[in-house]
Image (spheres, rainbow, N blue to C red):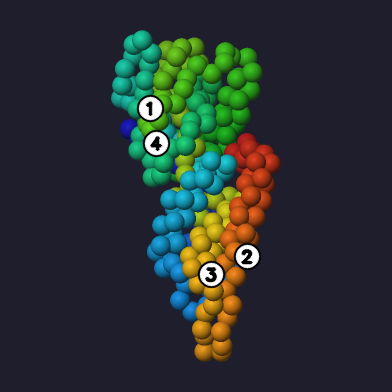
Amino acid sequence: MSLEFNPLAAMGFGLEIEGQQSWNNVIENIKIQCGAIGQFEYSDEAIIKLLKTQVMPFYSVYDSYPVYQRMTTADILSDFPTRVYKLHDTATKIISVRNIISSEYMHLGNLVENSLFGFGGHSIEDYLISRNYSDMQKSIIPVRTWKYIPPNRIEFIQLATISDNYDFIIELNTVHPDPSSINPTMYDKFMDMAVGYMKLSVGTIRSQITSLSTPTGTIEITPDQLKQEGQDLLLRVKEALKMTPPDKLLYLL
């Protein structure tokens, strides 16, 4: 039985920012920052494809999209010499496993899929409290005894952290599906990365020409400047992301 939800969407962030954080918004800003005149070098569809395949996966390494799944006995692939579970399919690529919460640390009882959050009538606050409790428990339980095996398996080296319980919640770091899933406080960094990448890409294309004829006259093209701006912007946002503390939104109660 699959269980998957995102707390940002569950708490209504997606509804509040839907009109602002969108591919259309990103594309419009890219064209402005790249000094688009008339027909742009890339179609809107091509821009989205580039950002989905080249920018979003890299950005999500620093600021991932959390997805939660319930693991049960039905997900066990093998139980000897180690216990291996197969993760459920996700909308986007799994980057890593962020956390595992055993039922013995959760205090949530049986988890079912018929509530708003997929947690059987328990509120998101209940779940987050249990997760905070789980984090505190980590200071007194052994070093992590599981490892993620890409693309969709998790192996328990020892069973001390989950005892004899086969059911637990796994928190996955995944690639953001689109701009609307990004925390609003981080959206500027994603936008900078997208603009920087496209400036570098467009500058490379424009380096093949030196001028452009328009109804108002000839415009001198400076592709090297655009490429340099793109490189500088990418370096700045990369350093900013490295300095950004881990996302604590889920811990705020």
Q: Nearer the viewer, mark 4 or mark 1?
A: 1
Residue at 63 percent across and 38 percent down: it is 246
Label 4 and label 1: CA atoms lie apart by 16 Å
Q: For the residue marked with disc 4, what is the amino acid?
A: Leu
Q: For the residue marked with disc 2, what is the amino acid?
A: Gln
Residue 18, x across and y down, in percent? 51, 60
Q: Which residue position is annotated with label 1? A: 153
**Total residue callouts:** 4
Q: Earlier in the sequence, mark 3 or mark 1?
A: 3
Q: Nearer the viewer, mark 3 or mark 2?
A: 2
Residue at disc 4, secondary structure: loop
Q: Nearer the viewer, mark 4 or mark 2?
A: 2
Name above or below for residue 142 compared with residue 151.
Answer: above
Q: Which residue position is annotated with label 2? A: 225
Residue at 57 percent across and 43 percent down: it is 63
Q: Earlier in the sequence, mark 3 or mark 2?
A: 3
Label 3 and label 2: CA atoms lie apart by 16 Å
Q: Name the image quarter holding residue 69.
A: top left
29 vs 236, nearest the viewer: 236
Q: Which residue position is annotated with label 3? A: 31
Label 4 and label 3: CA atoms lie apart by 39 Å
Mark 4 surroundings within 10 Å by alpha-carbon count, few (fewer than 14), some (14 through 19), many (20 or more): some
Q: For the residue marked with disc 3, what is the amino acid?
A: Lys
Mark 1 surroundings within 10 Å by alpha-carbon count, few (fewer than 14), some (14 through 19), many (20 or more): some
Circles 4, 1 touching at the beta carbon (< 8 Å): no
